[in-house]
Amino acid sequence: QFLNLEVNEEKRKLVIDEKEISLTKKEYELIKYFILNNNIVLSWKRLLNDLWGYDYNRDTRIVDVYIFNLRRKLKGSKAEIEASRGIGYILKER
């Protein structure tokens, strides 16, 4: 749990203020990872290696695509995923 975000392990959904948000399998894994590592800048390399099992390839846009989708789903929450220019992303309080 982080702020008003909570993951429902059983349903594999994100819960924001008791409202369930449907996620894809990878979105669920990603938000759970961010919640466990909140307020820590997570590099693209770390995200790719830990969640996709890819070796780091700066041309890969897959992380950015999933972050874009998660940001839309986090609207109305107290948390946001912010870019740390040239490094990666961080889940923090708005």
Image (tube, helix red, strand yellow):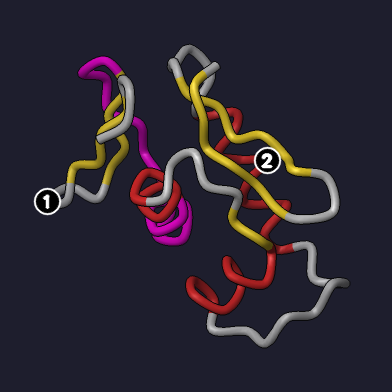
Furthest toward the front, the residue is 40
- Which residue in the structure is indicated by mark 2? 68
Pointer 2 or 1: first along the chain: 1
Question: In percent of the image, x 79 and y 62: which residue is there?
Answer: 61
Q: Indicate which disc residue 10 carries.
A: 1
Front-most of 1 and 8?
1
Question: In percent of the image, x 37 and y 44: which residue is there?
Answer: 35
Q: Amino acid at mark 2?
A: Phe
* Screen quadrant of the C terminus: top right
Q: Horizontal and vertical percent for residue 68?
A: 68, 40
Per the image, label 1 sits on a secondary structure element best described as loop
The image shows residue 51, relative to residue 13, as above or below, that is below
Magenta-tinted stretch: 17-30
Between the C-alphas of marks 2 and 1, the distance is 25 Å
Q: Horizontal and vertical percent for residue 50?
A: 49, 75
Q: Horizontal and vertical percent for residue 46?
A: 59, 70
